[in-house]
């Protein structure tokens, strides 16, 4: 079963993403800010990171920059998500962007494309 | 002891940039202060505070908006997007939206406070909005909550960050810690008065500053929240009249101007009182046209006649009104007499007067002001408005309906409309030999002499004409005119052409 890390400060969004992915067969871990997310990465290697842009302590773009700068994390695809499509400007540090609110099928399609099916 | 509003500020102001609100707050919130915005759901709290945040960053500052189990940021931003103040550019850069609930849930109020402190510091925010502060209550006892509020106040003050807390509580009198600790309370309400929905804002507390007390109406539209300070509170102390020596402002109707010694005194307020169709608007148009002829900017502020109808009416009496409008000497502002906001009307009127330095104002259909939510305000409202107009040296002529077409007694209407008039001109019909005639009489002119005699007047294709005398109308004010007129000032050559509608003869 593939691990997905969801870094999201909005409880309702994190819960929703978690339910959708777990029902699809992924194992989900939630971090509620960027710092928590990087702490998790220090000890785990998820198949993919879904990350909100605006969060307390460390935001999504900072997380993406840190991951991109560290060879140990660079291979982990990042899906950035935000409430504003204007924030989707690609800076090369993440693989895909999802605009909130998103269609569950779009979420699953992106995850499957970047991380592969849950059991592979 | 000086009034609070005249005291110098001990702290710099943080403008809210909400139209009207900074005026009520004497310039804005105080830097580093802790403020509570409260109101029941749907009163506009979230729009107000987001608008403050967007305007704050638009002025070059930085802000953080923290939610504690409110609607998701995506949903909130989607709701804000159609509003004109919404700008995606600063979001995630100088305007930051985050949820504080994970910190609160995991680490309690101490964790939330710690997160807020580091977020404000990291983002160098000078404005912090916390939406849903009420959600702290179940997670902290009274003492813990009080301590959180005090710590928040001290922390944010030290960071120079002004903080606004949003709470859905509607009862400010509930003994709640935030009410006693905060530096100010802005209460929003939404109620029905008759069939109308009324939104209001009231400053219930504002430490260290004066403010305009009482309720003020608010509107929520495409530009977000607009606050309309209560006119009578806003202009409670009008500046002393600073005009030059008072001028005579004539109507351009020789006999009438002669009756008022050359014209109305500048800065005065004159009521044209009359039955429907008695010629009030025509007289007012003359007043504006004469001003335009002399190069004095005029404003027609009306309710019942649309601009095209007004132009048509003016052209029928040979007034080149349309040309004056095109040339900008006269401006026409029309609004239907529907659900108008009293204070918004005053703002619109005074803004137009300031914009063009208007000298002559014709307020056509003042009865429309009666169709407001709080008619008991009208007396004070008009006193404040006319005081301000006088201070601006605007000469105002306004029309008021006299419901009686052929009343047996000339009884003046009661109320605010009469009280605000320094001068009063009565336009009446009189029935004589089965025909209607128009009569004009001056009831009062304050601070000036005038001719009190009753005159016949006519509306002809050449304009309004006032007779030099009307001796036959000695009993006109009692409605008992007798058919014996030795000299009216008009030659009478036939009954047909001497009627109220059809006469085309000039003043001899």
Image (cartoon, coloured by chain):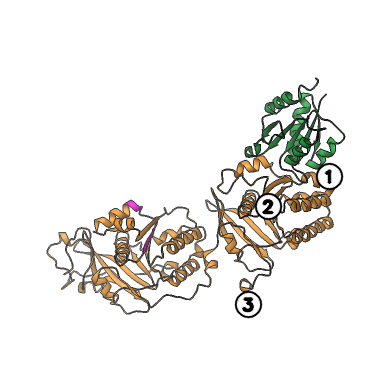
Chain colours: A green, B orange
| Residue at image mark 3 | B2
Do pointers 2 and 1 mark residues of a single chain?
Answer: yes
Position in image of residue B425 (x %, y %)? 33, 70
For disc 1, the chain is B
Neighbour class for label 3 at 10 Å: few (<14), some, many (≥20)?
A: few
Name the image quarter holding the C terminus of chain A: top right
Quarter-wise, where is residue A79 in the image? Answer: top right
Neighbour class for label 1 at 10 Å: few (<14), some, many (≥20)?
A: few
Do pointers 2 and 3 mark residues of a single chain?
Answer: yes
- Label 3 sits on a secondary structure element that is loop
Q: Give the Cα distance between marks 2 and 3.
A: 35 Å
Point out the tag, 2 or 3, that comes first from the N-terminus.
3
- Label 1 sits on a secondary structure element that is helix
Point out the tag, 3 or 1, that comes first from the N-terminus.
3
Q: Nearer the viewer, residue A56 or B170?
A: A56
| Residue at image mark 1 | B106
| Residue at image mark 2 | B63
Q: Give the Cα distance between marks 3 and 1.
A: 50 Å
- Label 2 sits on a secondary structure element that is strand
- Check the image and name the residue furthest to the left: B493
Point out the tag, 2 or 1, that comes first from the N-terminus.
2
State the extent of the magenta-drawn residues as a range: B297-308
Position in image of residue B377 (x %, y %)? 51, 64
């Amino acid at each position: 079963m593939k691990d997905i890390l969801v870094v999201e400060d909005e409880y309702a969004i994190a819960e929703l993403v978690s339910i959708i992915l777990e029902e699809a067969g992924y194992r989900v871990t939630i971090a509620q800010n960027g710092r928590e997310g990087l702490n998790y990465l220090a000890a785990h290697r998820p198949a993919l990171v879904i990350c909100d842009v605006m969060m307390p302590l460390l935001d999504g773009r900072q997380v993406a920059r840190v991951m991109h700068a560290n060879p140990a994390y660079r291979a982990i695809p990042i899906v950035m998500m935000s409430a504003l499509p204007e924030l989707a400007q690609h800076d090369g540090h993440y693989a895909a962007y999802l605009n909130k609110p998103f269609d569950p099928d779009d979420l699953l399609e992106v995850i499957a494309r970047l991380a592969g099916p849950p059991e592979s | 002891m000086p009034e609070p509003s005249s005291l110098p500020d001990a702290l710099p102001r943080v403008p809210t940039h909400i139209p009207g609100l900074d005026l009520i707050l004497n310039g804005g919130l105080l830097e580093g202060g802790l403020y509570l915005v409260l109101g029941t759901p749907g009163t506009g709290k979230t729009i107000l505070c987001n608008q403050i945040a967007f305007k704050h960053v638009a002025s070059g500052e930085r802000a953080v908006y923290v939610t504690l189990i409110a609607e998701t940021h995506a949903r909130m931003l989607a709701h804000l997007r159609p509003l004109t103040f919404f700008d995606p550019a600063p979001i995630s850069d100088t305007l930051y939206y985050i949820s504080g609930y994970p910190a609160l849930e995991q680490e309690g109020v101490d964790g939330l406070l710690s997160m807020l402190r580091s977020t404000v510091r990291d983002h160098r925010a000078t404005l912090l909005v916390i939406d849903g502060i009420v959600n702290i209550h179940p997670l902290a006892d009274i003492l813990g909550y009080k301590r959180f509020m005090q710590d928040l106040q001290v922390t944010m003050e030290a960071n120079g960050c002004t903080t606004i807390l949003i709470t859905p509580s509607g009862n400010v009198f509930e003994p709640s810690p935030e009410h006693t600790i905060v530096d100010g309370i802005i209460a929003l309400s939404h109620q029905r008065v008759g069939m109308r929905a009324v939104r209001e804002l009231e400053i219930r507390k504002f430490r260290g500053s004066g403010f305009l007390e009482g309720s003020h109406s608010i509107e929520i539209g495409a530009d977000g929240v607009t606050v309309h300070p209560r006119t009578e509170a806003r202009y409670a102390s009008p500046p002393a009249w600073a005009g030059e020596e008072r001028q005579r402002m004539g109507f351009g109707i020789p006999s009438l101007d002669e009756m008022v010694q050359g014209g109305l005194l500048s800065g005065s307020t004159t009521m044209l009182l009359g039955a429907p169709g008695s010629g009030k608007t025509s007289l007012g148009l003359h007043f504006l046209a004469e001003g335009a002829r002399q190069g004095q900017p005029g404003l027609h502020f009306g309710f019942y006649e649309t601009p095209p109808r007004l132009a048509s009416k003016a052209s029928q009496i040979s007034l080149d009104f349309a040309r004056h409008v095109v040339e900008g000497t006269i401006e026409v502002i029309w609004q239907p007499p529907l659900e108008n906001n009293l204070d918004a009307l005053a703002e619109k009127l005074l803004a137009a007067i300031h914009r063009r330095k208007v000298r002559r104002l014709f307020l056509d259909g003042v009865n429309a002001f009666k169709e407001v939510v709080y008619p008991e305000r009208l007396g004070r409202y008009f006193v404040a408005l006319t005081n301000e107009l006088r201070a601006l040296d605007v000469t105002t002529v306004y029309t008021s309906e006299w419901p009686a077409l052929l009343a047996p007694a000339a009884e003046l209407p009661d109320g605010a409309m009469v009280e605000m008039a320094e001068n009063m001109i009565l336009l009446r019909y009189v029935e004589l030999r089965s025909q209607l005639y128009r009569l004009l009489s001056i009831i009062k002119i304050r601070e000036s002499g005038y001719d009190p005699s009753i005159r016949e007047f006519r509306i002809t294709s050449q304009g309004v004409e006032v007779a030099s005398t009307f001796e036959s109308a000695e009993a006109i004010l009692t409605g008992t005119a007798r058919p014996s007129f030795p000299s009216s000032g008009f030659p009478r050559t036939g009954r047909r052409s001497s009627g109220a509608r059809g006469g085309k003869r000039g003043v001899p």
